[in-house]
Image: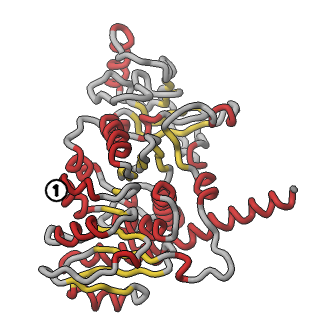
Amino acid sequence: MGVSGFGGETTPPLPLQGLSALLGSGLNKPLNGAYADLVNHLNQLKKQVIAVDVPTGFFSEGKIDLNAVVLKTDLVITFQRLKINFLLPESAFFMDDFVVVDIGLDEKFLQNLDSCYHLIEEKDVIKAVLPRKKFQHKGTFGHAMLIVGQEKTMGAALLCASAAVYAGVGLTTACIPASGLTALNTLIPEVMAIVREEKQLPEIEWDKFTAIGAGSGLGKNAQQLINALLSNYKKPIVLDADALNMLSENLDWWKSVPENSVITPHVKEFDRLFGKHNSWWQRLETAQKQASAKKIVIVLKNQYTIIIVPDGQLYFNSTGNPAMATGGMGDVLTGVITALLAQGYSSADAAVIGVFIHGKAGDDLALANGLNVVLPTQVAARIPAIVAKLTAQKKAENNAAVFLI
């Protein structure tokens, strides 16, 4: 049996050995008694299981208890809308995969339901992207500066800078150590450089940049430079990697982080910033509080990366795959988001669009080439084609609307 659903993909046929439809998504307390005994017995059989709606015993929302009695499931067929907890890493302990099947419920009604949880889909990004117009020039598309790299991690700096160029920013400047200048000029001649010495702050005209991203491969010895950034630049910035680690060690710096700045932590960086957490659900709660209190956008990287904005809304990304799990992928994302911010997108839109097209590039590469691993350089180079496709679809939809009028 193959099932078509979430993401337009069709699951491969599974030899059906067990179909679970015992309890649905309305469950709000742990299994006990006869139900718990039955599920424990079924788990011991180690048979292949397909679940309807949710795995029996699995909570759709709230903290996922890894010790809970839940029927371990190979595939979940859920209806119309996926469940939030399917998108959190702990779900993998109980289920391998899921598909969402359209059963004809009123889509307009569902869209109008009050919820702080949103799934980023291609149609949402098409609405948000801005097609290029005649007579626009490099000055139209902003100037991004990237404070990145040290002698041993110039690869991260190059990935970040190349991604910014591929994401369409008009001008890109990289603030890098002198040891990286030859590599930058050779590999990415489109990028200008501000050379920095180890113990001396470079002269920077901060106001000339429409967005600044910092952190990729920066190392621990650039605290003075990041402090200068926070002291002198008042527009939204993008902070990643070592810049986040510095922030976690200098909590008083938070008061200088501009409103609507974007931070892009992975789980360990998130916990360094905001304290140890016992579950991903707890991290979501913390992210909502911190995004609101600090008036920032948090990009919490994950299989389904989560963007949390200051008004408490959470946006789960639907693109990306495990083939992208390799060093440097986050540096590419930082470059993409910084480039979009520099072009005039709002911080929330830059994060949402950036995360989506970054994951979509990885999906296209993995699918088209049957790749087990996708390289960050490949993802960066794929970005222009992804954006071109999205903007072409937007133009086609706009033209169709004009024709209908």
In the picture, measured across the screen, residue 214 lies left or right of residue 221, that is: right
The picture places residue 20, in percent across and down from the top left corner, at 49, 23
Task: Give the amino acid type for the residue marked by disc 1 in the picture.
Answer: Asn
Residue drawn at x 52%, y 63% as measured from the top left = 345
Q: Residue 55, relative to residue 323: is it above or below? A: above
Residue 366 visible in the shown view:
no
Instruction: Identify the residue shown where x is 33% and y is 80%.
Output: 205
Q: Residue at x 26, y 54 (%)?
A: 255
Q: Is residue 3 visible?
A: yes
Q: Nearer the viewer, residue 216 or 261?
A: 261
Q: For mark 1, does the 10 Å Cα neighbourhood hold few (<14), some (14 to 19), or many (20 or more) residues?
A: few
Q: In x, y percent, where is residue 130?
A: 61, 66
Q: How many marks?
A: 1
Q: Which residue is mark 1?
A: 250
Between residue 124 and residue 94, name the one nearer to us. Answer: 124
Q: Quadrant of residue 402?
A: bottom right
Which quarter shows the C terminus?
Answer: bottom right
Q: Is residue 181 left or right of residue 169?
A: left
Residue 404: % across, % down? 87, 56
| Residue at the far top in the pictured view | 33
* Percent position of residue 294, x then y: 33, 48
Residue extending farthest to the left is 199
Q: Quadrant of the N terminus?
A: top right
